[in-house]
Amino acid sequence: MNTFYHKNTKTTTLDRDSVHNLEREMKIRGFSHRTIESYLLYNRIFLEFIGKNSTAVTNNDIKNYLESIRDKGCANSTLNVALNALKFYYRQVLKRKFFFDIKGAKKSNYLPTILSREEIEKMLLVTKNPKHHFLISLMYSAGLRVSEALEIRMRDFDLDRKMITVRHGKGDKDRCTLLSEKLVPILSKQLSLKEPGDYLFTGADGKCHLTAESAGKIVKKSAEMSGITKNVSCHTLRHSFATHLLEAGTSIRYIQELLGHSKLETTQIYTKVANTNLQTIKSPLDL
């Protein structure tokens, strides 16, 4: 997540109480843990930026803050998350009557980075650490977000049905996704060594799960070692999963379910990068 700090001002007791009320309200409404963390973070950053307590905030303060993070190069998606966090707090919780003339940033239409099957194989070939190899294999083969992969516990695997239950995914939704047959033997061994509630991927202490930062470094290192020059992240593996399924003829509706997208439009981005239709078209240089 991109964050933008501007000042080191101290928040007042009133501010802390207000932000606590925001947290309580989101919990009551059933917001996901990730959304709660994100909304609290952006509201705290905003209060530090303006140097006021929440009861004194004006519409112009909101605009000044959004302009400042735009000037620092934040992505449109980040700006919109910050705006939504502030809108919820000041309109829904504090019942303030502004934001009517503040519109969200235009959604960026960037195409996702996709790895070929050959590039995935190269990454796995150069990854000698068994734990790192399995992490990359699982994220790619199941189309998992990095947070979902790291929070998976041993009880979430169904080896007989070749299924993984993803609990509390984005939007706090549960779903099922694929478990590759190639991963079953390793998982069988892990299941015999760990308790049902244990994380699959643990950190140095053996209890907490691996951090997203560590997972990102593992994936990036494997990509660099295999000679891939693309900008590869954990999410690239998820993009590649969806694209490869689409190229193999899997219904986009099924892919939507496997990815946990609430809207089909989100999944349709992969139709723009899949080469299913392009394979039948020849370049004019080859005609």
Image (cartoon, rainbow, N blue to C red):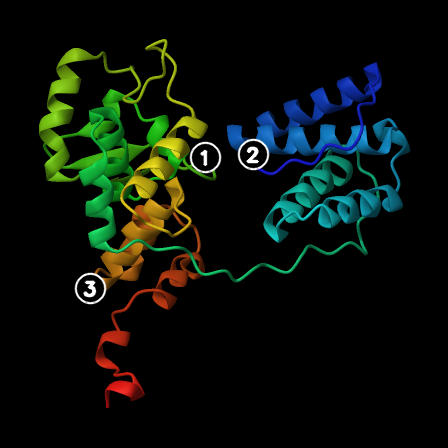
Tell me the quarter of the image containing the C terminus. bottom left
- Say which element carries label 2: helix
State the separation of the CA atoms marked 1 and 2.
9 Å
Residue picked out by circle 1: 172
* Front residue of this view, candidates 27 and 14: 14
Q: Are marks 1 and 2 in contact (CB under 8 Å)?
A: yes
Please, is residue 133 above or below residue 105 in the view? above
Residue picked out by circle 2: 35
- Say which element carries label 1: loop
Residue 254, which numbered label? none
Earlier-in-chain disc, 1 versus 2: 2
Task: Specify the amino acid type for callout 2.
Answer: Thr
Residue 47 appearing in the image: yes
52 to the left or right of 39 = right
State the separation of the CA atoms marked 2 and 3.
34 Å
Residue at (67% x, 48% y) in the render: 73
- Across and down, in percent, residue 131 comes to 24, 25
59 to the left or right of 42 = right
Residue picked out by circle 3: 249
Q: Quadrant of residue 283?
A: bottom left
Earlier-in-chain disc, 2 versus 3: 2
Task: Specify the amino acid type for callout 3.
Answer: Gly
